[in-house]
Image (tube, grey):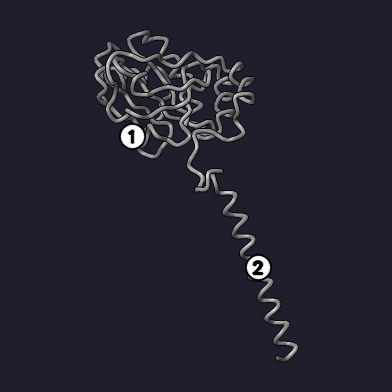
Amino acid sequence: MRSSTRWTVAVLVVLVALGVALWSELGSEDDDGAGGPAAARDRRAADTAESLAGPRARADLQPCPSPGTGAGPEALRGITLECAGDGSTVDVAEALAGRTVVLNLWAYWCAPCAAELPAMAEYQRRAGPEVTVLTVHQDENETAALLRLAELGVRLPTLQDGRRLIAAALRVPNVMPATVVLRADGSVADVLPRSFDNADEIAAAVNPSIGVPG
């Protein structure tokens, strides 16, 4: 074999070996540590209970709803999420059972969401106990969500839903913010893929579908 040919073969062997090593490295980064591909996550690995303690204290969110009466919305049964305020696990359908609920779907990086959240808080204040406003954060970065809520002074109960399970289950269009109105019997009264400027707009859009006076 000629010397130039031997060098060509040697270079090819090295390149193949490097390619295999790089492929293996990329594959290991995508593993979930259990021998399989990493699944979508509700929150980042960096968002541990310890790292979230400070942001949670700053946000000082209201507790998520405790289990209500009945099985809750059928589409949401079997979905469990973290309550951003305290890290507890929430069975979503059970928490919403027997309640008239306004679900506000948002993300910390969404400017219209940030503008709308204080209006949602004001709507909750006006509506009182007849309606439960529950926000759903749809991004893995839970720390950023808590800091955004603290910055806005919005203390509404919040579910951490980085996988967007609620939106998928309720077939909400892929826009943010979006609002879903649920009747006490668990049925969907309305899906509103739009933003609101103030509490009056929210009441005008939401209250007729659930029989609440404006």
On the image, which quarter does residue 17 sit in? Answer: bottom right
Q: Earlier in the sequence, mark 1 or mark 2?
A: 2
Disc 2 marks a residue whose amino acid type is: Ala
Image quadrant containing the C terminus: top left
Query: Does residue 7 appear to the left or right of 53 in the view shown?
Result: right
* Residue under the point 52% across and 15% down: 61
* Residue under the point 67% across and 81% down: 9
Q: Where in the figure is residue 26, as x and y percent of width and height?
A: 60, 54
On the image, which quarter does residue 176 sit in? Answer: top left
Vertical placement of residue 45 versus 132, above or below: below
Separation of disc 1 and disc 2 at Cα? 45 Å
Image quadrant containing the N terminus: bottom right
Farthest right residue in view = 3
Vertical placement of residue 113 versus 185, above or below: below
Q: Where in the figure is residue 204, as x and y percent of width and height?
A: 31, 19
Q: Where in the figure is residue 30, as x and y percent of width and height?
A: 55, 49
* Residue under the point 39% across and 9% down: 126
Mark on residue 44? none
Disc 1 marks a residue whose amino acid type is: Ala
| Residue wearing tag 1 | 169
| Residue wearing tag 2 | 17
Q: Residues within 10 Å of mark 1 (few under 14, many from 20)?
A: few
